[in-house]
Image (cartoon, rainbow, N blue to C red):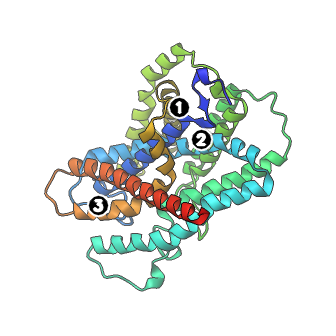
């Protein structure tokens, strides 16, 4: 347990990390709600609801959030994994991850995915189909938002395997690790694009985005290294670095968004050459990811390292909110489908109402579980 005067860890909870995870779940809802109202039809063929009333802003937000939100959650998961492995060794660790990740995943793909297709067809005035087509192995969207759970379970298994190999970490510093992750991420994403290997790999058990999977795993390992090196036990001191990053961090984000949109609007029309454009695109993506991840971590460490009653409840709900949010979002978006109000207002309403409804559902669920446990104990 870390000194309470530092306010970092109290009662085995890392408050700023809990709050960061809660915020990332909210941003995931914002991210997915953007697919309903974005103008360019990114998810028109497969997303649960697509509104004819749309706007440019949700699409821009979608592209920005897609840079760092999932990566940040993998970082948090990586940070917590050594702590989990310390408390539960070997098979006990694996069983706990099976119970926490794969059991909910199995239930979700067998219940929520069929509901997803029902809403998808109904919103487009299409007839319902044979029940055998409602499962993820028969759908174009496959696991959809649930892909995260098996991938995280795979990362946990790999981490468990690595932990059995006694690696001398005395020479590994945070600076070296960050540079290694940065360069490997850049080289990997550049090669995946250059050799046209980007896209999604989809199977019955696991889905992943080809150009992101290694980057996510490296960030997961970076999070675990931060835990092992106790990086967050020291105080934030480098104000000069913060100023430099905040003054320049917007540059790669804007360049990445511009180059990405340009490549989508004018495929095959390169500003200089295919190799150069691809390299600059991926360089700005990795720079943007590094900056946004740094901003999230330092902001929550510095300003959001406390937890009240509401934030505590939101933190407890966050995992369940992630699992159910798309199925809650679908009917809410469906209700507003033919309401004549501006699309940006609909976007705001859908995001807030989905988040609120999911948290109410999870609070109710946990209250029922507590009552059942009390009755069993009696």
User: What secondary structure is found at the residue carrying circle 3?
Assistant: helix
Q: Quadrant of the C terminus?
A: bottom right
Which residue is depicted at the point 51% across and 52% down? 319
| Residue for badge 2 | 75
Where is 129 relative to 340, above or below? below
Quick one: label 3 or label 1, which is nearer the N terminus?
1
Instruction: Report the residue marked by disc 1.
Output: 297
Q: Residues within 10 Å of mark 3 (few under 14, many from 20)?
A: some
Badge nearest the viewer, 2 or 3: 3
Numbered mark located on residue 43 in the image: none
The residue singled out by tag 3 in the image is: 332
Question: Which residue is at 23% across, 47% downward?
Answer: 344
Inter-mark Cα distance, 3 to 1: 32 Å
Residue most extreme to the left: 340
Which residue extends farthest front? 378
Sequence-wise, the earlier of marks 1 and 2 is 2
- Judging from the image, what secondary structure is the residue with disc 1 in? helix
For the residues bearing labels 1 and 2, Cβ distance under 8 angstroms: yes
């Amino acid at each position: 347990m870390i000194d309470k005067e530092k306010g970092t860890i109290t009662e085995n909870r890392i408050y700023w990390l809990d709050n960061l995870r809660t915020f990332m779940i909210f941003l995931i809802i914002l991210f997915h709600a953007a697919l309903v109202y974005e103008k360019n039809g990114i998810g028109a063929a497969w997303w649960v609801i697509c509104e004819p009333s749309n706007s440019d802003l949700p699409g821009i937000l979608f592209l920005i959030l897609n840079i760092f939100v999932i990566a940040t959650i993998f970082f948090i998961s990586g940070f917590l994994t050594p702590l989990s492995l310390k408390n539960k060794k070997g098979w006990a660790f694996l069983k706990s991850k099976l119970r926490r990740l794969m059991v909910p995943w199995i239930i979700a793909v067998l219940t929520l995915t069929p509901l997803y297709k029902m809403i998808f067809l109904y919103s487009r005035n299409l007839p319902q189909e044979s029940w055998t087509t409602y499962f993820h192995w028969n759908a174009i969207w496959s696991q959809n938002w649930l892909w995260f759970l098996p991938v995280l379970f795979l990362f946990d298994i790999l981490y468990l395997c690595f932990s059995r190999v006694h690696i001398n970490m005395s020479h590994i510093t945070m600076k070296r690790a960050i540079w290694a992750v940065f360069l490997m991420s850049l080289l990997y994403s550049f090669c995946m694009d250059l050799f046209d290997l980007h896209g999604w790999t989809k199977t019955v058990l696991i889905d992943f985005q080809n150009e992101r999977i290694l980057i996510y795993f490296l960030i997961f390992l970076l999070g675990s290294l931060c835990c092992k090196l106790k990086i967050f036990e020291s105080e934030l001191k480098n104000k000069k670095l913060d100023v430099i990053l905040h003054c320049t961090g917007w540059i790669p984000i804007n360049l990445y968004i511009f180059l990405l949109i340009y490549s989508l609007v004018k495929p095959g029309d390169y500003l200089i050459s295919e190799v150069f454009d691809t390299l600059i695109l991926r360089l700005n993506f990795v720079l943007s990811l590094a900056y946004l991840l740094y901003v999230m971590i330092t902001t929550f460490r510095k300003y959001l390292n406390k937890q009240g009653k509401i934030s505590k409840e939101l933190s407890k709900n966050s995992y369940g909110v992630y699992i159910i949010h798309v199925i809650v979002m679908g009917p809410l978006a469906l209700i507003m489908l033919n309401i004549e109000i501006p699309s940006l207002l609909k976007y705001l309403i859908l995001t807030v109402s989905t988040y609120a409804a999911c948290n109410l559902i999870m609070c109710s669920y946990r209250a029922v579980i507590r009552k059942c446990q009390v009755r069993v104990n009696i």
